[in-house]
Image: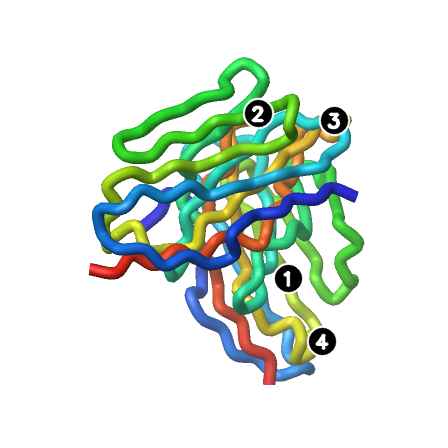
Amino acid sequence: EDKVVQSPLSLVVHEGDTVTLNCSYEVTNFRSLLWYKQEKKAPTFLFMLTSSGIEKKSGRLSSILDKKELSSILNITATQTGDSAIYLCAVERYSGGGADGLTFGKGTHLIIQP
Amino acid sequence: DTEVTQTPKHLVMGMTNKKSLKCEQHMGHRAMYWYKQKAKKPPELMFVYSYEKLSINESVPSRFSPECPNSSLLNLHLHALQPEDSALYLCASSQDRRQPQHFGDGTRLSIL
């Protein structure tokens, strides 16, 4: 059974701080790892990391995939109150079905205090 | 608002009712998904449709019945649900297996 473990489960920091969120995984036939941000409604896509793209950056957010350690980190620099959300890590595996669902970790609940 | 549209946004139904959830996307995506999310838990995969064919059913009870009438539309038919089925039901779509899944805002379902 696929397994995704995120840490910490919750984190409270002050505006302007830098945070690092962790995700480790055990999955058969790993294909990709994805990060999502969830506020009140839909998870919003942030990054997708595969063997051919192990580092991604967008503004203050960046993510790295370590295939040897079976883990990933999500960094947020100069945090803002709008970054407060649950950050979900998910993995996808190869299967013969043509499309694969995601297995999610429990998420990191990030709170940014003004 | 997302490009994956789910209706209704909220639904309250009794255990003997029959209702349907609807999901629509016009991005030309050929894979569509249903997830169930309980409070303070991550989404859990229920069904995967690829090119309008059911490719994954994660051992979901038969009181949930998915349907994909065309490449833009995904339905989830509900019948004789239990109170523990109360949750946020999320639909997602993706271009293909190489592209990320994009989620709708969900339908918040309450079973009385």
Q: Which mark is residue A21?
A: none
Disc 3 with disc 4 on a shared chain:
no
Binning the other alpha carbons within 10 Å of mark 3 as few (below 14), some (14 to 19) or many (20 upward) gives few
Q: Secondary structure at mark 4?
A: loop
| Mark 2, residue position | A66
Q: Amino acid at mark 2?
A: Asp
Q: Is residue B81 above or below residue A4?
A: below
Q: Nearer the viewer, mark 3 or mark 1?
A: 3
| Amino acid at dot 1 | His
Do the residues marked 4 and 2 share a common chain?
Answer: no
Among numbered discs 3 and 2, the one appearing first in the sequence:
3
Which residue is identified by label 4? B80
Residue depth check, mark 3 versus mark 4: number of the one nearer the observer: 3
Asked whether residue B61 is in view, the answer is: yes
Reading the image, the residue beneath label 1 is B77
Q: Residue at x 48, y 63 (%)?
A: B107
Q: Badge 1: few (under 14), some or many (20 or more) residues near its Cα, within 10 Å?
A: some
The amino acid type, in three-letter code, at marker 4 is Ala
* Secondary structure at numbered mark 2: strand
> B82 or B18: nearer the eye?
B82
Q: Quick check: can you spot residue B26?
A: no
Quadrant in which the C terminus of chain B is drawn: bottom right
Amino acid identity at mark 3: Asn
Q: Which chain hosts label 2?
A: A
Which image quarter: residue A39? bottom left
User: Foreground mark, 3 or 2?
Assistant: 2
Mark closer to the observer (4, 2): 2
Instruction: Answer whether labels 3 and 2 touch (C-beta < 8 Å).
Output: no
Image coords of residue A46 (percent x, y): 40, 37
Residue A57 is situated, as x and y percent measured from the top left of the image, at 35, 26
Whether callout 4 and callout 1 share a subunit is answered yes
